[in-house]
Amino acid sequence: MHLRSFGVLLGICFVFSSNATKLPKSYEKTPVLIHLSAVKQHDSIGFNVVKALQELIYPKLLTGDLALWEGSDKKKIVGSQNFMAQERNALVPFVSSNDLFIHEYWDIFNKTFTSELKGFSFTGSTKAGKKINYGYVDIQDISNLLKNSIIPANASGSAEISYWNALHSKTYCCHLVQFGNNNFRTNPRASLQLQYQALQDPSINRDLAKISPVKKIKYKVLAPDINLNIENKNFYSIFTESINNNKQTILNNSVSKHFQTTLLLPWRIDQISILEKWSKYKNIPFQELVSIELIIDKQVITLSSKQLEELAITINLQSLEEYISEKRFTFLLEEINTQEIAPQQSETYYKALQTNPWNKITH
């Protein structure tokens, strides 16, 4: 199925009901083409498939490590040089292109909808307003990359979704533009009806990827020289003492010669940043320590939770992880998932994590 020019196609999210009587009750491995618009993806989804997929494959298209075909029939390779020449004529860079077309096969059998990815087509526009067809990437050439790569997620999303599961969750906003040989030019309403039946009709079961509510939270514990909280002073003091009593742990995790040359001198911790994984159990957030990043003498050291256990740090008669979970110290959120948090928004976002539905954290 070749990508045709469909004019301006707006990807939309909708709730649509119909008393349509001409919809097929079942169909088997029907080729479909769906359109996604980058600007139509909602923050509450947590990820932007269009933007993320383009950023993921762009380096491989430049090097030619990922096959880019002229069409889904895979008769002719575009090649990295031709791809770069097309991008030079584009109004915006490839990674900023608005439109993504996903080729799939759809089935409805026994009132159950399933889908199978076939590939992706990428388009753009020239500075003169003409359409650019960058080409087609086949799923067989990219499936392992999609399965083994985590899609960037904002604060409202989940931190551990692979591109593969994001695509198979069908939570993104899209528009069905071709179903078999039907391109809906004479009956646009049929597109809405078929899409509603497949993706939203409550009478149809769906075999879709489930998204677990998981957040990665990174925050900076303010240093005692800029904060008066006694807990901050205590935390830095105990951590500094532990590091100086267990210098081999730092040496084992640093390629810098700095620590070897200053081995006999006292080390000073300038900053402590903590990375946690948050999940929900019976709607209650559960915090799990992932790692701690230390800046010691302007050198960055990251210690995993397992390495931190070896230090056997206790604070106020509590284990390190238990103490950190109570957050008596003053801190600033730095990131939620892959979204950076401005210092002045730290408190607002932290309260949202505790009180808001987890798909409504962004502001």
Image (tube, rainbow, N blue to C red):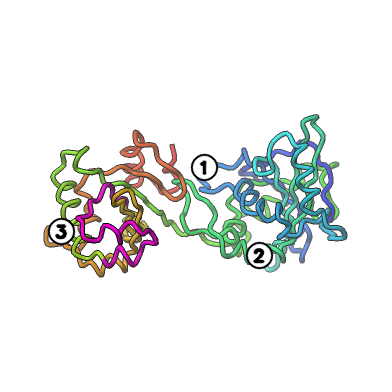
Quarter of the figure that contains the C terminus = top left
Of residue 93 and residue 277, the one placed in the foreground of this image is 93
Which residue bears the numbered disc 3?
315
Q: Which residues are magenta?
A: 248-273
Of residue 76 and residue 60, the one placed in the foreground of this image is 60
Of residue 70 and residue 292, the one placed in the foreground of this image is 292
Could you tell me which residue is drawn at 25 percent across and 64 percent down? Answer: 247
Report x, y in % for residue 330: 23, 43
Mark carried by residue 143: 2
Q: What separation in Å lies between label 1 and label 2 (alpha carbons)?
A: 25 Å
Decide which of tag 1 and tag 3 comes sooner along the chain.
1
Of residue 180 and residue 62, the one placed in the foreground of this image is 62
Decide which of tag 1 and tag 2 comes sooner along the chain.
1
Question: In this rendering, which labeled residue sits more in front, label 1 or label 2?
Answer: 2
Quarter of the figure that contains the N terminus = bottom right
Could you tell me which residue is drawn at 78 percent across and 42 percent down? Answer: 188
Identify whether 277 is placed above or below 187.
below
